[in-house]
Amino acid sequence: RTCAYYIFSRGGLQVITTIRKFRDDLTAFPPDHLVCVPLVLDTLHARVMQRLRSAPLLRRQLASLLLAVSTAYVRACRVTGGLELRYACSATPWHVLLGASL
């Protein structure tokens, strides 16, 4: 809700829709910002994946390749930005600090 209030303060337009009319409303009102609940994103993802499953083989392979490249890029950005928990820097152990000071 806070995001929506900020967008309103900058002159944004709010469009309230349903899942059934969401596709038509996206084309009628192309968003600069999209504030939604996770169900909307899950529904969009499910529909895209459903269409990909029924697409020709070449299109499926191309989409899979592009999704893999996109996922790798996002992970690399998270690692270099220090946001990936698996590669987060932990505090230097005390015995390493003690050895460095001697």
Image (tube, grey):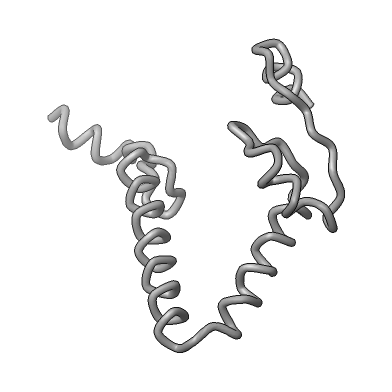
View extreme (front): residue: 28
The quadrant of the picture occupied by the C terminus is top left
Q: Residue at x 33, y 52 (%)?
A: 76
Residue 46, image x, y percentages: 69, 69
Considering depth in this image, is 52 or 83 the residue closer to the camera?
A: 52
Q: Identify which residue is drawn at 46% across, 49% down.
A: 85
Image location of residue 8, percent across then percent down: 73, 16
Left or right placement of residue 70 versus residue 101 in this view? right
Horizontally, residue 34 falls left or right of residue 57, namely: right
Q: Nearer the viewer, residue 47 or 102?
A: 47
- Residue 82 vs 32, above or below: the answer is below
Q: Residue at x 33, y 36 (%)?
A: 94
Q: Residue at position x 54%, y 83% from top? A: 55
Q: In the shown orientation, is residue 102 left or right of residue 18?
A: left
**Which quadrant: the N terminus?**
top right
Give the quadrant of residue 69: bottom left
Against 3, residue 42 (above or below) is below
Please tell me in which quadrant of the rendered image residue 44 appears. bottom right
Furthest residue toward top: 9
Percent position (x, y) of residue 49? 61, 73
Q: Position of residue 60 (x, y in %)?
A: 47, 80
